[in-house]
Image (cartoon, rainbow, N blue to C red):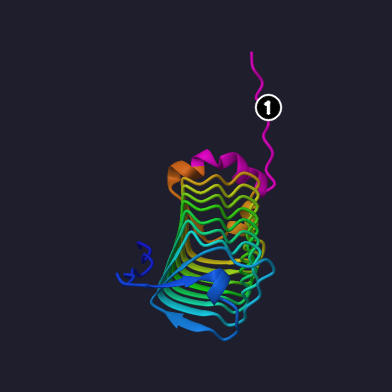
Amino acid sequence: MTLRPPAGFTVPDRLAAFDVMRDLAEDELRIEGVSVTGIAAPGLRVRHWSLAESAVRGAVLAGAELPEVWLREVAVDGADLANAKLRAATLQRVRLVDTRLTGATLADSSLRDVVVKDSQADFAAFGTAKLERVLFSGCNLREASFGEARLREVRFEHCDLSRASFHRASLQRVEFVACTLTGVAMGDLRGAAMPWSDIVASAGELALGLGITAIEEETG
């Protein structure tokens, strides 16, 4: 059965300006219909930031602490969220393109109808998160952690997942297509699906994951 793709959405044409340096400074902030830009102040920490029907364009929030942030129908393009702490975030109908998520923490978060495309998410932490109808396309997910996460109708395509961890993760209708899986514990991918050509290409990794060693064939 074909996976259901993440639900689409359209950002309004007219958006008010919102600068993270000037305007993002208080907890419980609820805004919608804005274009978020700018560079956040060092050490920024804002709880319960709610953003809806908006765009985040090139904003720099690297290292910011944004626990329990809530995003709905938000298009993120060219933003820097490296090492951002987004624990217990809620993302619904969100699109992240060309976004830097290196080392970002999304533990205990809920991602539903989310697309992450052409983005850097190496060392990102999705531990104990819930992902439903999520697409990762063309992403660097090297050494990302999905430990104890629940993944349902999630597709990884053309992603580098080298040494990523899925330890004790729950996978339901999860697909890996044309991905690099070097160093991934194959036993942790139980329940996932792959094209037959990818299975053949990953035969060595699969054998290692099952504890199978190769016998050198005698010649002559």
Q: Which residue matches tag 1?
A: 216
Left/right placement of residue 141 relative to residue 118 reads right
**Residue 70: percent from the left, percent from the top?**
51, 78
- Frontmost residue, 120 versus 7: 120
**Residue 134: percent from the left, percent from the top?**
46, 65
Q: Quadrant of the N terminus?
A: bottom left
Res 149 visible: yes
97 lies above or below 15 = above
- Frontmost residue, 10 versus 40: 40
- Disc 1 element: loop
**Residue 145: percent from the left, percent from the top?**
64, 60
Q: How many marks?
A: 1
**Residue 8: percent from the left, percent from the top?**
33, 68
Q: What span is colored magenta in the figure?
A: 200-220
* Residue furthest to the front: 22
- Frontmost residue, 46 versus 200: 46
* Residue furthest to the left: 13
Left/right placement of residue 54 relative to residue 84 reads left
